[in-house]
Image (cartoon, rainbow, N blue to C red):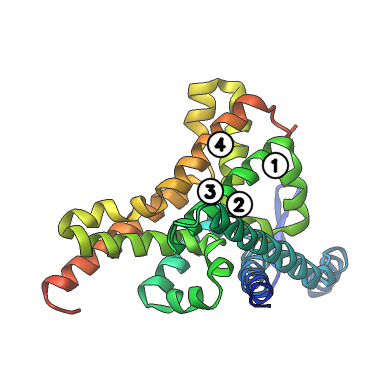
Amino acid sequence: MLECAGFVNNIFVEFTPKQKKEYNEYVEKISPTSRKGWSLFRAFLIGGLICAIGQAFALLFGWIFPSYDKETIGALVSCALILIASILTGFGVFDKIGNFAGGGSIVPITGFSNSLTSAAMEFRKEGIIFGTCANMFRIAGPVVVVGAAISILVGLGYFLGGLVNLW
Amino acid sequence: MEIFMDFLLAFAVGGFICMLGQLLILITKWTSARILVSFVCLGALLQVVGLFKILKEFSPFGVSVPITGFGAGLAEGAIKAVKEDGFFGIFSGGFTAVAAGLAVAITSAFIVALIFKSHSK
């Protein structure tokens, strides 16, 4: 539900039900609700495509490095996608893909890479060390922090479980 | 034919996860940092309860290319390291598993930032 009171010219006013209804209708009219389904489809399309490209890289790396196991190939695929996303961000292409795809380009590992690179570029003007290096993790930082905490938590849980012969 | 199925599954599963992300954005209006964090947590959780392995069997790149794969890799690495190294594995396992991806991401971001100018303005 929308707010039924608010500030107008710094004066707190309560809206009448009629005004409230009109406001709701106005918001309903200008917000592109019909495009929500379309944005879901776009996220599906681009996200799926990125994963399919990952699959293609897996085939390629499997052919180049036949001795590597599945896990290593998987890690290499991630590296390749990360590198490509980073370069595309540099060229400004990834922003355009991102505008189109929304969550479709954020959720794959490419989104992580994009957030790192765009922050690194954004702060380049403040210098290499104090700009780029210091601010690179502005957006992606939480992922690394939470990731570290989770991995230690899981490791600790598994270790303690092993101590009491849980598994 | 099997290769074609792999592609189709990666597309469908990966697309579905991204669609969930978009749905989350639409509902909560979260920024990308929060989306990334929640999907990392989701991936780790799925890994811990064993669901991720089943999904990965079904479509390896459909589930591990999305950032859920990062979370799952962290959790899996931690468990694997504890199995192998015991106590020390608690601390070393997670980042060992994702070391390559992180190193490439950081280095490429650094080099790209040195070469290209910001497009944001």
Label whose residue precedes the other's in the sequence (1 or 2): 1
Q: Secondary structure at mark 2?
A: helix
Q: Secondary structure at mark 4?
A: helix
Subunit bearing disc 2: A
Residue named by callout 2 = A110
Crowd rating for badge 2 (residues with CA inside 10 Å; few <14, some 14–19, many 20+): many
Crowd rating for badge 3 (residues with CA inside 10 Å; few <14, some 14–19, many 20+): many
Seen from the viewer's position, the closer of residues A131 and B65 is B65
The amino acid marked with disc number 3 is: Cys
Q: What numbered label is drawn on residue A79?
A: 3
**Residue A36 seen in this snapshot:** yes
Subunit bearing disc 1: A
Check chain identity for marks 1 and 2: say if they share one: yes
Residue named by callout 1 = A88
Check chain identity for marks 2 and 3: say if they share one: yes
* Cβ–Cβ under 8 Å for marks 4 and 1: no
Marks 1 and 3 sit apart, C-alpha to C-alpha, by 14 Å
Q: Where, quadrant-wise, is the C terminus of chain A in this rendering? A: bottom left
User: Quadrant location of residue A5?
Assistant: bottom right
Residue named by callout 4 = B108
Q: Residue at x 64, y 46 (%)?
A: A85
Residue B95: x and y in percent read 35, 50
Q: Is residue B89 left or right of residue A136?
A: left
Q: Is residue B66 left or right of residue B23?
A: left
Q: Secondary structure at mark 1?
A: helix
Check chain identity for marks 4 and 1: say if they share one: no
